[in-house]
Image: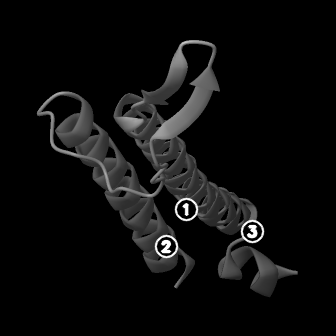
Amino acid sequence: MNKIFGYLLICAGLMLMLFSVMGMYKVFADRQPAAPVVQMADLRINTQYGPMQIPMQGVNQIANLGLFAVLMMFILSAGAKLAGVGNAMLKTERIHDALLQIQAQNAPAEQTLKKL
């Protein structure tokens, strides 16, 4: 049972990591837009030469890309943790099986016990 659950955790962790890497590839290499989370209005300031308007489109794009990267890194690390837990479960299961096999080899045979 632990083997099945361990393999499922490894597969789920790998799927999360693949999703994260593919999402980052699509946004940063294929230039697909990231989800707009931050929407700042254009900044308007008064100077000695009169009112001036500063466009915030670039800042919005950089903020959205930064938030997207942080989210994808979080999903990537969560997938790595899931795969690590699955790996640890499989390792302990293999150690348990190996100890049972060693114990079975070192057990005295039935014929030897009957002679006693």
Q: Secondary structure at mark 3?
A: loop
Q: Earlier in the sequence, mark 2 or mark 3?
A: 2
Q: Position of residue 57 (x, y in %)?
A: 35, 36
Which mark identifies residue 3? 2
Q: Are marks 1 and 3 in contact (CB under 8 Å)?
A: no
Q: Position of residue 72 (x, y in %)?
A: 45, 47
Q: Which residue shows up at 49% across the image and 73% down it?
A: 3
Circle nearer the viewer, 2 or 3: 2
Give above or below for 115 relative to 39: below
User: Label 1 vs label 2: CA separation?
Assistant: 9 Å
User: Label 1 vs label 3: CA separation?
Assistant: 32 Å
Which mark identifies residue 107? 3
Circle nearer the viewer, 1 or 3: 1
Q: Residue furthest front?
A: 49
User: Label 2 vs label 3: CA separation?
Assistant: 26 Å
Q: Which residue shows up at 42% across the image and 40% down it?
A: 60
For mark 3, does the 10 Å Cα neighbourhood hold few (<14), some (14 to 19), or many (20 or more) residues? few
Q: Position of residue 52 (x, y in %)?
A: 48, 25
Q: Which residue shows up at 61% across the image and 65% down it?
A: 93
Q: Position of residue 104 (x, y in %)?
A: 66, 68
Q: Nearer the viewer, residue 13 or 111?
A: 13
Judged left or right of residue 90, residue 42 is: left
Q: Earlier in the sequence, mark 1 or mark 3?
A: 1
Which mark identifies residue 86? 1
Q: Which residue shows up at 15% across the image and 34% down it?
A: 31
Judged left or right of residue 23, residue 39 is: right
Q: In the rendered structure, which amino acid carries the disc numbered 3?
A: Ala
Q: Residue furthest top?
A: 49
Judged left or right of residue 3, residue 15 is: left
